[in-house]
């Protein structure tokens, strides 16, 4: 499957087949996609809560009650459901933890480069914290970058996905005790395999995108 085939095959799946499950081998690849996503300054301000059991999915589905009830079945019928969480702070302890993890993985040929990267990452983090006053939003943008990376990656594996913001994030935070752990939910992605009856499949409901000449400008 080439990349053009992949982007034309994937779509926001509205009906999952509950009888089809993601294999252990493929789920291992899904976890790698989550870990290896890029982020600004490699800050990796994320955590992922995954449910593949009935009980686990029921806990996440508590965020689909009331106004968001239209998403309940999309959680319960999926093979796996991923709650995307953002950090609520990037304090000195976390910055040092990142630095030492990178050092352990051999990223720094010497101490000078290590400290230069540490200083640069803190400059950007402090810029968003004190100057732009949008550090939380900045970290959440990195989480959304990860979500996009996952959607394309799982499509390449032949796995269907549905990203959802139609979830009560406060309810998810409370159910999973995320805020006490220094995180907050920003979105949920259901993973699995489409039902043939899904009205939103590309062969039933053609995909629609703005034309290339409207959205791409080539500078000369």
Image: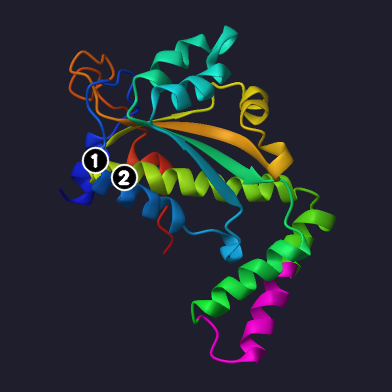
Viewer-proximal residue among 17 and 144: 17
Q: Residue furthest top?
A: 66
Judge whether residue 93 is colored magenta: no
4 relative position to 47: left or right: left
Residue at label 2?
27
**What's the residue at 66%, 90% (across, down)?**
112
Identify the secondary structure beneath mark 2.
helix
Residue 218, percent across and down? 40, 57
Q: Residue furthest left?
A: 1
Place residue 19 in its image quadrant.
top left
Q: Quadrant of the C terminus?
A: bottom left
Q: Read off the magenta span.
A: 107-122
Q: Dot 2, crowdedness within 10 Å: few (<14), some or many (≥20)?
A: some
**The one of 42 and 173 positioned closer to us in this rendering:** 173
In the figure, is residue 126 to the left or right of 26?
A: right
Q: What x and y, as percent, mark residue 114? A: 63, 83
Q: Quadrant of residue 162 in the image?
A: top left
Residue in the image at 54% along x and 27% along y: 165
Q: Is residue 163 left or right of residue 170?
A: left
Which numbered disc covers residue 23? 1
At 49% from the left and 77% from the top, the residue drawn is: 105
Kindly check if marks 1 and 2 are in contact, taking CB atoms under 8 A apart as contact: yes
Q: Main secondary structure of the magenta part?
A: helix
| Scheme of image coloration | rainbow
Up the image or down, 149 lies above or below 96; here it is: above
Q: Secondary structure at mark 1?
A: loop
Q: Position of residue 128 (x, y in %)?
A: 75, 56
Residue at (49% x, 82% y) in the render: 106
**Any magenta on residue 114?**
yes
Is 37 located above or below residue 1 in the figure? below
């Amino acid at each position: 499957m080439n990349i053009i085939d992949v982007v034309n095959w994937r779509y926001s799946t509205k009906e999952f087949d509950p009888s089809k499950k993601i294999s252990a081998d493929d789920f291992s690849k899904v976890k790698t996609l989550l870990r290896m996503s890029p982020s600004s300054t490699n800050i990796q301000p994320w955590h992922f809560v995954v449910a593949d059991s009935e009980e686990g999915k029921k806990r996440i589905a508590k965020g689909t009650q009331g106004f968001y009830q239209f998403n309940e079945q999309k959680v319960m019928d999926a093979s796996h459901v991923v709650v995307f969480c953002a950090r609520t702070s990037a304090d000195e302890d976390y910055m040092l933890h990142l630095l030492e993890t990178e050092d352990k993985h051999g990223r720094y040929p010497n101490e000078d480069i290590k400290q230069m990267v540490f200083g640069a990452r803190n400059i950007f983090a402090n810029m968003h914290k004190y100057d732009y006053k949008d550090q939380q939003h900045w970290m959440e943008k990195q989480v959304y970058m990860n979500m996009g990376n996952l959607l394309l990656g799982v499509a390449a594996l032949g796995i269907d996905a549905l990203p959802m913001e139609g979830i009560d994030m406060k309810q998810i935070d409370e159910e999973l005790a995320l805020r006490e752990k220094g995180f907050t939910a920003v979105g949920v992605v259901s993973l699995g395999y489409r039902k043939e009856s899904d009205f939103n499949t590309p062969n039933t409901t053609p995909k629609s995108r703005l034309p290339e000449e409207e959205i791409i400008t080539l500078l000369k």
